[in-house]
Image: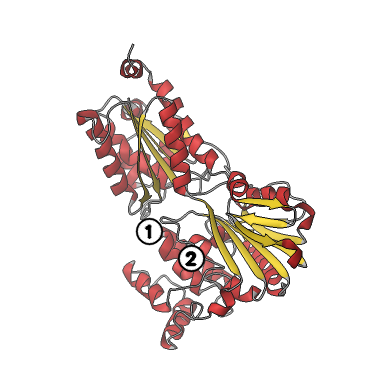
């Protein structure tokens, strides 16, 4: 019997099992521990990061700091490599994203909206780095979520005001680049300021990227990367989303004052402060896509990575992906059945309803109506960190029968979209993708199977 015929005979549950396996293979390849293990090693007293060597005998102290949803797992693997060589350290992680560490202190904090625990962690991190001397080494571990988990605002702005701004930006549909532009200007740590504080100590930053294009200056708002943004960029974003009446007055005043002073690119011009700083990206969305593609091929699919740069509005991304899946059904392009099309990146939602959900569940909900007439399409959209919005789900799985099952249950996808209530829609159908914390964060994975 041919491979194609065997694929035709597979039932919906079997295909759903396979799409879940493909997703998990991608996530496993970018597990924070695996990223550190691939990139870092110790040869006697030489610490090696991506073939670059650091003689540890040169340093009196080795400090470990950092922030992000995957940072605890990164720290766990780093402790296995360096062990008692670590003097001390502090990392800030999302609640329940922890690990058993011996030498590094963990502080659990709020994400995506920062809380006071995050502020406390940021103060401790800043003090460790600021007190490090010329003969000390600071290893900074950064992953997605690091911006919210390390909120140390400038003195002119209160923590509560910065917290309020984060909520405003999330709700208006600003993307991660725009949100982090504000974070850089309003922080004592971000936009290269942590590197400034640590000079002349040597700083090695290990980053797991959660941004499209892997721009190291955007990952956790680039605490050890020179800043190239100016205050006017923030003011333009405020105008773009028409939120001037919502932004706290003190923040507007601070941005305008610095703009008038023409305080532009001040950190980029201080290259001397970055001469002992080494930034490495050790994990990315593309790494996850490559592993997922390999798994799909092992399962017998013709596989294609569409792009790791998918961004923009979630509904537009969903329309595009569904159009490609329908094209595969009709013409066998861009690849023949059985097909697996993968993409990564991070989309945004302009929230207007009061429901519960996230961009991956919303993507899946948008797809329900678009694939209902095609009986052999299955779609998964999931966050690699195991969470989608303020929920316990990573995303959702839909197929050609989802609309029929929704109708039987009395659920109207269009009404749930209007309320931005994708979580409750899929929860009612038992179609949520539940993984728990995955100890990584490289944005999202979208998988479409055409059998």
Up/down of 167 relative to 296, above or below = below
Q: Which mark is residue 173?
A: 1
Q: Quadrant of residue 350?
A: bottom left
Q: Quadrant of residue 290?
A: top left
Q: Give the residue number, with chain letter if any, for mark 2.
A: 217
Q: Residue at x 20, y 29 (%)?
A: 330
How far across and how far down the image is residue 233, in percent? 38, 74
Q: Is residue 357 visible?
A: no
Q: Residue at x 44, y 64 (%)?
A: 179
Q: Please indicate whether residue 85 sits to the left or right of residue 189 in the image.
A: right
Q: Residue at x 45, y 79 (%)?
A: 265
Q: Is residue 197 visible?
A: yes
Q: Which mark is residue 28?
A: none
Up/down of 70 relative to 431, above or below = below
Label 1 crowd (10 A; few <14 / some 14-19 / many >=20): some
How far across and how far down the image is residue 69, in percent? 58, 52
Secondary structure state at the residue bearing disc 1? loop
Pick whichever of labels 2 and 1 is earlier in the sequence. Answer: 1
How far across and how far down the image is residue 51, in percent? 59, 55
Secondary structure state at the residue bearing disc 2? loop
**Colouring:** secondary structure
Q: Quadrant of residue 126?
A: bottom right
Position of the N terminus by quadrant: top left
Furthest toward the left, the residue is 331
Q: Nearer the viewer, residue 412 or 8?
A: 8
Q: Which mark is in front, 2 or 1?
A: 2
How far across and how far down the image is residue 124, in percent? 70, 67
């Amino acid at each position: 019997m041919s491979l194609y015929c065997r694929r035709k005979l597979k039932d919906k549950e079997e295909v759903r099992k396979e799409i879940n396996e493909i997703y998990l293979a991608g996530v496993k390849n970018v597990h924070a521990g695996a990223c550190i293990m691939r990139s870092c090693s110790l040869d006697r007293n030489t610490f090696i990061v991506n073939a670059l060597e650091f003689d540890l005998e040169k340093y009196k102290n080795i400090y470990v700091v950092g922030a992000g949803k995957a940072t605890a797992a990164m720290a766990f693997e780093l402790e296995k490599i360096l062990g008692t060589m670590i003097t001390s350290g502090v990392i800030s992680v999302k609640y329940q994203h922890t690990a058993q560490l011996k030498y590094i202190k963990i502080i659990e904090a709020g994400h995506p909206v920062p809380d006071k625990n995050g502020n406390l962690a940021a103060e401790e991190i800043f003090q460790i780095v600021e007190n490090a001397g010329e003969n000390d080494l600071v290893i900074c571990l950064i992953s997605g979520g690091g911006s919210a988990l390390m909120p140390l605002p400038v003195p002119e702005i209160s923590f509560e005001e910065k917290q309020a701004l984060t909520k405003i930006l999330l709700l208006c549909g600003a993307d991660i680049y725009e949100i982090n532009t504000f974070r850089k200007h309003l922080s004592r740590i971000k936009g290269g300021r942590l590197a400034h504080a640590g000079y002349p100590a040597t700083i090695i930053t290990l980053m797991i990227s959660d941004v499209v294009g892997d721009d190291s200056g955007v990952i956790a708002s680039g605490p050890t990367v020179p800043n190239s943004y100016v205050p006017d960029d923030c003011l333009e974003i405020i105008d773009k989303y028409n939120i001037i009446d919502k932004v706290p007055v003190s923040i507007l005043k601070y941005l305008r004052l610095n703009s008038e002073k023409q305080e532009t690119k001040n950190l980029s011009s201080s290259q001397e402060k970055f001469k002992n700083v080494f930034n490495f990206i050790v994990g990315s969305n593309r790494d996850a896509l490559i592993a997922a593609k390999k798994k799909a091929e092992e399962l017998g699919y013709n596989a294609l990575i569409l792009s790791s740069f998918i961004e923009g509005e979630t509904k537009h991304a969903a329309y595009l992906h569904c159009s490609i899946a329908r094209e595969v059904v009709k013409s066998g392009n861009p690849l023949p059945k059985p097909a697996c099309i993968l993409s990564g990146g991070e989309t945004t939602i302009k929230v207007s309803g009061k429901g519960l959900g996230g961009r991956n569940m919303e993507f899946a909900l948008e797809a329900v109506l678009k694939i209902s007439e095609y009986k052999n399409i299955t779609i998964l959209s999931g966050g690699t960190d195991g969470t989608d919005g303020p929920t316990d789900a990573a995303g959702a799985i839909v197929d050609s029968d989802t609309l029929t099952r929704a109708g039987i249950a009395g659920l109207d996808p269009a009404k749930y979209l209007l309320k931005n209530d994708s979580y409750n829609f899929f929860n009612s159908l038992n179609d949520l993708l539940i993984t728990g914390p995955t100890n990584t964060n490289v944005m999202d994975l979208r998988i479409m199977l055409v059998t």
